[in-house]
Amino acid sequence: MASKLNYCWRVVATGFCFALFGVGGIILSTIVLPCQRLLSRDLETRQRKARHLVHNTFRFFVGVMNTLGVIGFHIENPNEFKKLKGQLILANHPSLIDVVVLIAAIPSADCVVKAHLFKNPFMRGVIKSTGYISNADPEGLLQDCCKSLGQGNNLIIFPEGTRSHQGRLQKFKRGAANIAIRCASPITSVLITMRPSTLTKGTPWYKVAPTKAHFSMAIAEEQPQPWDHNQQEPLSMQSRNLTKYLENYFQNQVANL
């Protein structure tokens, strides 16, 4: 009986959290961020302040989910996330809330978002105000990523391009490798677990895990080796080789979690 009541509570609490996220996005887009824009004329300053606001908002949201018992959260060595600067952050992607927790943990986080989210009424204003990077234009995306990293932002990328399926890593896309090579950026890998699995690809929000899920996140102890760029190889070959290396690296790391 107690377990059934707990399950029902988590369904209700999960629905509340999704509603809170949507309402929060509208309030930020229509009230808070427009007011913030009035206080600063410089675009980079406005975007930096907007990203910091989103960072604090997501910290609050993660705290609400934790307090309500929807999901338990554990961030290993949180101060290490705060120290990151100018890093290409690569992470596996087991759940819907991975990017939320990453942005909540990293004060100066930037990220690449799918173009269709610029049309989402809940997130459109937030994404435009923060200057998060659209993946609509591949060439422009690379320029924007290099600029962001050069400004000292930490750029979050999920090399799979989408959420993992039933705990198995998807085949890696070449986007992360292209950014690493063309921007000559250092890589920090982050490992995420969600047990039991929930908020996965293709699973509706109300199908919560049978028991309370626990989200864990840590900077990997063993980081990818610095990539030795072979200048004689075309960029396409370099990108293919680095993508394969990163895919094997993450498969080994995730297998040991």
Image (cartoon, helix red, strand yellow):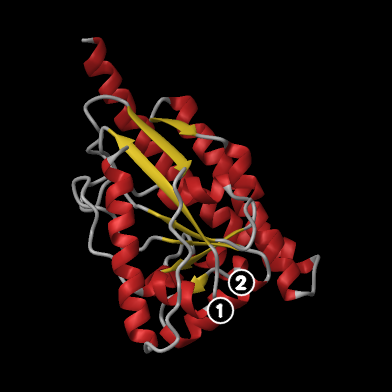
Which of the image's four quarters has the C terminus? top left
Vertical relation: 206 (above or below) 26: above
In the rendered image, residue 60, in percent from the top left (x then y), is placed at 57, 39
- Which residue is at the front of the view, 155 or 30? 155
Q: Which residue sits at x=56%, y=79%?
A: 144
Q: Which residue sits at x=41%, y=36%?
A: 216
Q: How far apart are the two marked residues, 2 and 1, measured between alpha carbons?
A: 6 Å
Q: Which residue sits at x=69%, y=63%?
A: 48
Which SS class for mark 2? helix
Q: Which residue sits at x=37%, y=87%?
A: 233
Using residue 257 as the reference point, say whether residue 64 is left or right of it.
Answer: right
Residues at badges 2 and 1 in contact (C-beta under 8 Å)? yes
In the rendered image, residue 146, in percent from the top left (x then y), is placed at 57, 77
- Which residue is at the front of the view, 51 or 182? 182
Using residue 43 as the reference point, say whether residue 245 is left or right of it.
Answer: left
Q: Amino acid at mark 2?
A: Ser
Q: Residues within 10 Å of mark 1 (few under 14, many from 20)?
A: some
Q: Amino acid at mark 1?
A: Asp
Which of the image's four quarters has the N terminus? top left
In the rendered image, residue 63, in percent from the top left (x then y), is placed at 53, 33
State the image quarter where residue 228 is shown. Answer: bottom left
Residue corresponding to mark 1 = 144
Vertical relation: 199 (above or below) 31: above
Residue 148 marker: 2
Q: Residues within 10 Å of mark 2 (few under 14, many from 20)?
A: many
